[in-house]
Amino acid sequence: MLKSKTFVKKTRSGGVLKIVREHYLRDDIWCGSEVCKECKDEAPVLQEDACIESTLCVSPHYLIPDTNVVLHQIDILEDPLIKNVIILQTVLQEVRHRSATVYKRIKDVVHDKEKHFYTFTNEHHRYTFIEREPGESANDRNDRAIRVAAKWYTDHLVKATWGRTLKVVLLTNDRANKEMAEQHGLLVYKCDEYIKSLSGNPELVDRLALTSDDQNDITGSKLLFSEHLPLSRIQAGIKNGVLLQGTFHANRDNYLEGTVLIQQDEKDVTEVLLQGLQNINRAVHLDVVAVELFPKDCWVAPLSVVLQDDGPNDEDAEEDEAQNKYLQILTSKSIVRKPTGQVVGIIKRNWRPFCGMLSPSQIKEATRHLFTPADRRIPRIRIETRQAATLVGQKIMVAIDGWPKSSRYPNGHFVKSLGTAGDKDTETEVLLLEHDVPHQPFSQAVLSFLPKMPWSITEKDMKVRVDLRHLCLCSVDPPGCTDIDDALHSRELENGNIEVGVHIADVSHFIRPGNALDQEAAERGTTVYLCGKRIDMVPELLSSNLCSLRSNVERLAFSCIWEMNHNAEVLNICFTKSVINSKASLTYAEAQMRIDDTNINDDITKSLRCLNKLAKILKGRRTEKGALTLSSPEVRFHIDSETHDPIDLQTKELMETNSMVEEFMLLANISVAQKIYDEFSECAVLRKHPSPPPSSYDILFKAAKSRNLVILTDSAKALADSLNNATIESFPYFNTLLRILATRCMMQAVYFCSGMDSDFHHYGLASPIYTHFTSPIRRYADIIVHRLLAVAINADTTYPDLMDKHKQAALCNNLNYRHKMAQYAQRASVAFHTQLFFRNKGIINEEGFILFVRKNAIIILIPKFGLEGTVFFENKDKPSPDHSFDSEGPTLTVEKHTFHMFDKVKVTISLDASNIQHQRIRMALIEPVIPGVSVAVTESEPEAKKPKLDR
């Protein structure tokens, strides 16, 4: 059957356009049940024995959830107990429109054969399609469509099964929809009453998301927060400039403070400060909010105070005390004020399931408890569970359902248990989930696009590639590296010049555009390196085997080859697809040993010495142009081979060979960036590093001024020269500390599409253009760059998405997000392994330096361990010492001793495991000795690392 709808619309030019929409209906769409005798379904999904023990419906039955049940109870639908569910096309389309996250989750459930979920295309079935009636809302029409489909299924199964007692249950939380379904003789229940009827499944009941009625039942009548404005008033306020729209960022160190970032245009971002719970007004980290600015005379400055939020169980007294104390601090006048305001409405919630631990109520037999998230930026969440005794000591996941204005905390529900807190596997799972790192095993759909083994290079491959197997090239990587992206060579030419080659794994040969393997790699964006674990962007067959440029095996490569003179000046450049055979896989230490040992003079060593000599010239030239050499101590764990626990912790030592490889990777990236931009000025994927705003350098200026030094930041070169000159003979580590501080002032480097931006400059490298080409095994951006370069040199064909600047820009946004979260996950892994290291070490005495001075604390860096921690001068259980803070220094005077930035101190370090959720490194001052000072427990984490160079 064919349904058609004709209507006319006015065009921009004033003409009239007739539009005919055709809708095809069929009567041969299968019901999907294996018990059906009428439908000729060759692969039925719904089981004949659809038994689930329910006190409401004792007969075998299929479930049909409506849209809101799918949207809000997806955690229930994902549970292994829930099977034989019919997902209507109407429901799926609505879910897709309203929540991309839930849509992906329900699609994954449908594809899980063990779940027996069947998608029924009711919108194209002759007997279930309905027209929208005059005056009927789209929502009411869809509710009616769901009821019609449920009625058809009920009648169809009675007829098709010859009267067997197989029923269809409609699940809806909409009172009106339920009443109308009952009038039509349908078997219909509210979702919560059906789930509660399933015997012996208390964990499933805990997963029920609270409805608005439920939330009103568990909150008081006292209003704690202001009412949020409706969306219509928010939109009008933003349009006329009364309100501002931005993303809320909670303060990790101070839960009573946060900022809203307002994106004015491409470059201009305004920060609005929020202080106090009432002004934050139920915003959760990363929510998109509407903000109302206060008058200028009410603006305040961010506080340099660090709140020790130990988290009371479920009482508000300690939080009230903290807020009162905080508000007292706010009354003090500050010189530098920032735009300050309050949240008046929520535009978009960015809630996700959160990992953390249950803080059980002190009331016996209570079912309402507080959940404390692992992320300190997220407020505690009130949940209902009857499993509190079982869940204590477990890491669990909880989702937020809502936050009424009369509730101190948001309300939520239990999702699942992850395992015992402190267990390595559990904690690794938590940090991956918390940082949104895709880490599920690669699906069969993805693996099906891998090459069939045994694999070898074919004659067809050789015909379209340059044979470079005779060249004496080698790779230089960290120890234990199996995903080897790059190899290098150098040799002297007959004309006296030098040929230098960077050869990169040709991953794009194996990952073709648009297939499942490509889509998965694009979604993951990057390989994530944790301590003792690697989350690959591509399957291991590629990352550690076919694409890895291991020694003495033939591999496909993408080569960048320069002809240089002995002053490292590029005379000629060639890009080509190639076949190579690496002669050695070396570590940085092994390569350095070869260079330094004058008794070794084989071809590989000669090549390395030549490369090293040229690299020093290249680095000197970059430094002259203003490239920055920053500092950030990185740590390496030595892992026990049996227990996999860290047994030693050291800062990484950098060698000349590290710089040697770095220089040629940088040169390759710059060369390729220029090539793809010349060929594709609108759609080249590039990487830029914006120059920091002047205010970012304030702390750097103060640190230098305290030692009577001046730092210039007019340009990258001015900063580089200032840092080079900022030395103190009696304090050798001072320059390193200054460079660590300068690293903190930097902006994050980002990917972008050339056709969507005009500022290409890379501040840190002092390069006018840059991209990533050299690591396609672990970065998806490099795969795109390979494809662009291949098209530019006629080595491959293009495809529409590659030339679409809008799609490239969207891809870059995802890659930037994935790279940022990968960095955070890596730091969290280092923090956890640092705790494991100190667990069996007892108390260790170490020297450190003060990095930052706060109003009530000092932040100390321990160079030996790359460890950074906070020492508080306040204690909840004891009187606080006399202390005063001077923001100009900044300095903190405690009992007549004044602490400055970069002061040398001595501390004891030990692990405090009394709080399983947030195990802490305990630091106590040894030197200087301050009589009567009791140092509080400190939260400690590895020093935040940024790469020295954007390789």
Image: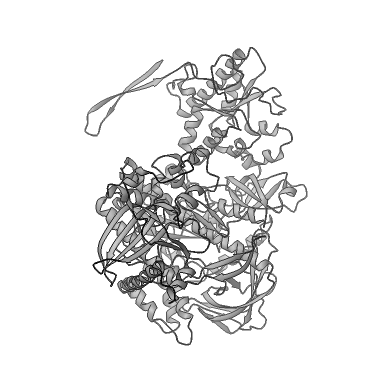
Say if 746 sits above or below 884 in the image: above
Front in this rendered view, residue 298 or 807: 807
Say if 63 sits above or below 833 in the image: above
- Display colour scheme: one colour
Say if 451 sits above or below 877 in the image: above
Q: Quadrant of residue 113?
A: top right
| Residue pictured at 78% horizontal, 50% vertical | 364
Residue 424 location (% of width, % of height) = 64, 56
Residue 430 location (% of width, % of height) = 60, 53
Using residue 452 as the reference point, say whether residue 798 is left or right of it: left
Using residue 419 as the reference point, say whether residue 260 is left or right of it: left
Q: Quadrant of the C terminus?
A: bottom left
Q: Residue furthest right?
A: 364
Q: Quadrant of the N terminus?
A: top left
| Residue pictured at 53% horizontal, 17% vertical | 40
Front in this rendered view, residue 416 or 562: 562
| Residue pictured at 45% horizontal, 71% vertical | 594
Say if 4 sits above or below 255 in the image: above
- The answer to whether residue 741 is seen in the rendering is no
Residue 128 location (% of width, % of height) = 50, 19
Front in this rendered view, residue 724 or 226: 724
Front in this rendered view, residue 537 or 201: 537
Residue 857 location (% of width, % of height) = 57, 73
- The answer to whether residue 376 is seen in the rendering is yes
Looking at the image, how many numbered discs can be counted on the residues? 0
